[in-house]
Amino acid sequence: RHTESIEGKIKKRASGIIIAGALFCLDQSVKYSFPASDRYYCNHDGPWGTVMHEEVLLSGGALLLVAFGTFLLRARGWREIVAFAFLFGGGLSNFLDRALYGCVRDFSVVSRFPAFNFADVLLTLGAVFF
């Protein structure tokens, strides 16, 4: 049985944190490139257009971020690390929007599909990586 060194484990997990941070920054940069206009939508609803109270969205988001962060730090394989990095980076970006602006800044609208942003794509890809 192959055992990984402590240094290897630390490097993998640090890489996951770096990936999550880079994705968070990328999403925030994309959102700032779409200033308030007709291409920018302040989404006050929950995931997939569900209607929820702001307190529920913020507290639920905080709990999910703690869970994603914990799993990211405990992940062993690269697939898990990348999946949780995508979930953490995308979740943190949407959480920050909701905490600062009272909404999630969405900019992509596809007919018959709720508005979304790059962080939503990251969250979806993170789930698919599992």
Image (cartoon, grey):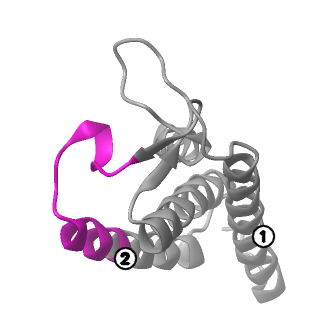
Structural crowding at the residue carrying mark 2, measured as other residues with C-alpha within 10 Å and reported as few (<14), some (14–19) or many (≥20)? some
Please give the name of the residue rendered at 61% of the width and 62% of the height, measured from the top-left corner. 89
Please give the name of the residue rendered at 35% of the width and 68% of the height, measured from the top-left corner. 61
> Which image quadrant is residue 84 in?
bottom right
Question: Which of 70/26 is in front?
Answer: 26
* 53 to 9, vertically: above or below: above
User: Could you tell me the amino acid type at mark 2?
Assistant: Ala
- Where, quadrant-wise, is the N terminus in this rendering? bottom right
Question: Which of 14/58 is in front?
Answer: 58
Q: Disc 2 designates what residue?
A: 62
38 part of magenta stretch? no
* 3 to 101, vertically: above or below: below
* Residues marked 2 and 1 touching at CB (< 8 Å): no
Side of 55 where 102 appears, left or right: right
Where residue 18 is drawn, which disc sits there? 1
Residue 39, image x, y percentages: 59, 31
Q: Main secondary structure of the magenta part?
A: helix
Residue 127, image x, y percentages: 46, 44
Single out the mark in the foreground, 2 or 1: 2
The magenta stretch spans which residues? Answer: 43-62
The disc, 2 or 1, on the residue closer to the chain's N-terminal end is: 1
Please give the name of the residue rendered at 56% of the width and 56% of the height, measured from the top-left corner. 90
Please give the name of the residue rendered at 41% of the width and 12% of the height, measured from the top-left corner. 111
Side of 7 where 115 appears, left or right: left
Side of 115 where 89 appears, left or right: right
| Label total for image | 2
Residue 19, image x, y percentages: 75, 62
